[in-house]
Image (spheres, rainbow, N blue to C red):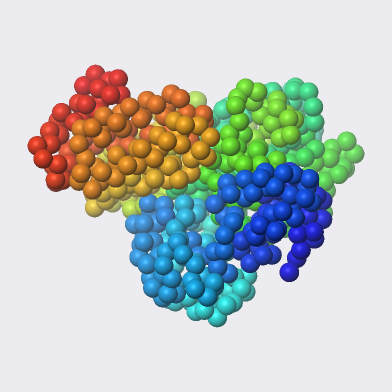
């Protein structure tokens, strides 16, 4: 077993690598972090013990108590539930003789739920000691149980059992790119910074992570800020239903790193990071291989492409289970070895990011798009999309469709066209952009996926007529309550109050008071939360109340609240939100 001292030495005793050190120490200690190990790490890094334990306690995949040699986590996203995750969890508990959330008496195994694992097209899915196991039904479940009872280490489990498909259904210029490694980079090397900036501006490339901020503006600001700049790739796609970055990293990781290197050339950065969500640990060997090949080809490292003044390298930082780290400043805190709590802004990361240095943070798809723009040419890119939304968009489609997976479509494609591609039948509702996005009704299927209409980070979940939409909304609300970092009171308390009100409505015990309270919470969270998690947490229930009043009315009338006036309750909810009834 590796000692704490060995692990600290491997990470150069660098406090900014605390999350990575804790991950390695946990693996060495049999899936948890004993108090003595935390103390050794604190001494070795020169940090207060409370700081180290506070970081360990923040992340869902770091364990301060024993969880068994095999920790089995069942994905609890709503589409996984529809695929049978609850039944899978129950079967695992029964077969393994363990109660959910507890460790078996012999210390071998525990079983519990976790948030979305990014395998929504291959559910129900598990994480076993952090490694993904997709499509766990029937024979595969039996196989998992046999391997655990045989005490077989997870890295020795059959490759077929652990194989994740990339899920690509439709390719476009990004997923189908045939660019040779370095092709786009060489074009940038022979262009002036002004030409590079002009191309970015003309391409109208905007961030693909959800906010849609213009890439040219971000990169230019970082380039002109004083200090040694950094390039960061946000690969922490934790929004339930989103898994398009997984496909990009599996199929086009070289393209993503090429985009990062182009950004480094333009901004003058010498250091880069890929922040990979903990659920994608299975991608780590592949990514490290891609980086090694690029170094060998002089496309990464020192003297890139023979240019002695062009040095840039990339390190992969593995997350540890925290949705909030998808927010760029929380991600930077985690990169620095801290709890992933979003920072106050301003200052912004482009001027004061990683360790106070100018930092360009873009997501996986954005860097891949940048490489395609410079590799294929500006005109080919602008030929796709709309006036305000250029190029293509990767969509993760899951739920009630015949062909779940990844579809690359031009911006401007209608929701109806997207549903046809995925083989949707009867449609009751579509969640566009994940739980923080917009829930739309069948009347809105001709709306376009575009920044000027329905901006979408990538997730589309389809629900047919058999689904209980209130159940969907409740699941999303519980997700936000669970994932709140706890920093600000509106989000920490408000999300939990909302789950109580929604649970009462789901159980048939609701009243107009619950609807009025949800209206008040909508305004409170939207206007006073510290970051985007709290700001967007009410979206799902707000859209449900506004767009599906008949569905809610039927649900309430089937309840047992005496003399419940549905119409009056809906009026009360709208009034509480400050709207005209």
Left/right placement of residue 435 relative to residue 280 reads left
Quarter holding the N terminus is bottom right
Asked if one can make out residue 524 in the rendered structure from this viewpoint, the answer is yes
Instruction: Looking at the picture, tell me which residue is in the foreground, 28 or 308.
Output: 28
Relative to 218, 391 lies left or right: left
- Above-or-below relation of 513 to 347: below
Report the residue at 78% width, 34% height from top.
269
Please provide percent x and percent y for residue 436.
Answer: 43, 37
Res 442 quadrant in image: top left
- Residue 161 visible at all: no
Q: Is residue 150 above or below residue 327?
A: below
Give coordinates of residue 40: x percent, y percent: 75, 55
Left or right relative to 25: residue 405: left
Q: In this orientation, which residue lies closer to the viewer: 289 or 2?
A: 2
Task: Tell me where residue 446 appears, x and y as whole percent.
Answer: 32, 35
Total tally of numbered discs in the picture: 0
Q: Is residue 411 left or right of residue 369?
A: left
Above/below status of 337 relative to 63: above
Q: Residue, x 33% and y 27% (percent of image)? A: 520
Q: Quadrant of the C terminus?
A: top left
Residue at the left extreme of this rendering: 563
The residue depicted at 48 percent of the width and 40 percent of the height is: 484
Query: x, y (%) of residue 278?
Result: 59, 53
Identify the residue shown where x is 67% and y is 65%.
29
Q: Is residue 1 above or below residue 438?
A: below
Residues 174 and 62: in front is 62
């Amino acid at each position: 077993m590796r000692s704490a001292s060995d692990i600290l030495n491997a990470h150069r005793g660098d406090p900014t690598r605390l999350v990575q050190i804790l991950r390695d120490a946990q693996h060495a200690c049999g899936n948890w972090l004993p108090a003595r190990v935390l103390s050794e790490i604190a001494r070795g890094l020169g940090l207060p013990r409370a700081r180290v334990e506070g970081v360990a306690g923040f992340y869902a995949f770091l364990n301060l108590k024993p969880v068994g040699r095999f920790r089995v986590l069942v994905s609890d996203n709503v589409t996984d539930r529809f695929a049978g995750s609850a039944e899978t969890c129950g079967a695992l508990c029964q077969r393994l003789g363990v109660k959910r959330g507890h460790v078996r008496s012999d210390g071998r195994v525990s079983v519990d739920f976790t948030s979305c694992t990014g395998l929504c097209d291959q559910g129900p899915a598990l994480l076993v000691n952090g490694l993904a196991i997709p499509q766990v039904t029937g024979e595969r479940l039996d196989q998992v149980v046999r391997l655990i009872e045989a005490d077989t280490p997870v890295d020795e489990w059959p490759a077929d059992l652990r194989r994740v498909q990339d899920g690509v259904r439709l390719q476009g210029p990004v997923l189908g790119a045939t660019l040779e490694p370095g092709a786009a980079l060489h074009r940038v090397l022979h262009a002036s910074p002004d030409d590079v900036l002009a191309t970015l501006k003309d391409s109208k490339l905007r961030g693909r992570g959800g906010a849609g901020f213009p890439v040219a503006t971000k990169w230019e600001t970082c380039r002109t800020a004083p200090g040694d700049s950094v390039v960061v790739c946000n690969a922490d796609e934790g929004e339930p239903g989103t898994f398009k970055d997984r496909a990009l990293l599996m199929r086009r990781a070289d393209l993503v790193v090429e985009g990062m290197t182009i950004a480094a050339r333009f901004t003058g950065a010498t250091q880069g990071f890929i922040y990979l969500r903990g659920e994608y640990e299975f991608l780590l060997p592949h990514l490290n291989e891609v980086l090694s090949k690029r170094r060998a080809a002089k496309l990464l490292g020192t003297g890139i492409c023979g240019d002695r003044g062009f040095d840039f390298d990339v390190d992969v930082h593995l997350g540890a289970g925290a949705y909030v780290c998808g927010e760029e400043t929380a991600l930077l805190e985690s990169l620095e070895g801290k709890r992933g709590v979003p920072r106050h802004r301003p200052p912004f990361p482009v001027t004061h990011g990683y360790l106070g240095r100018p930092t360009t943070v873009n997501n996986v798809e954005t860097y891949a798009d940048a490489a395609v723009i410079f590799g294929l040419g500006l005109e080919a890119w602008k030929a796709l999309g709309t006036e305000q939304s250029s190029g293509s968009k990767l969509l993760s489609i899951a739920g009630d469709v015949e062909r779940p997976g990844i579809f690359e479509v031009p911006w401007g494609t209608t929701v109806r066209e997207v549903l046809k591609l995925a083989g949707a039948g009867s449609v009751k509702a579509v969640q566009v952009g994940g739980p923080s996005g917009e829930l739309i009704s069948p009347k809105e299927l001709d709306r376009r996926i575009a920044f000027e209409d329905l901006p979408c980070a990538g997730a589309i979940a389809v629900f047919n007529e058999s689904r209980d939409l209130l159940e969907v909304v409740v699941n999303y609300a519980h997700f936000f309550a669970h994932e709140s970092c706890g920093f600000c009171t509106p989000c920490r308390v408000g999300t939990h109050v909302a789950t109580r009100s929604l649970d009462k409505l789901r159980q048939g015990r609701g009243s107009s008071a619950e609807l009025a309270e949800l209206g008040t919470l909508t305004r409170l969270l939207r206007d006073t939360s510290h970051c985007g998690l709290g700001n967007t947490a009410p979206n799902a229930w707000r859209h449900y109340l506004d767009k599906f009043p008949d569905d809610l009315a039927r649900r309430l009338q089937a309840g047992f609240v005496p003399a419940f006036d549905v119409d009056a309750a809906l009026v009360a909810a709208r009034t509480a939100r400050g709207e005209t009834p």
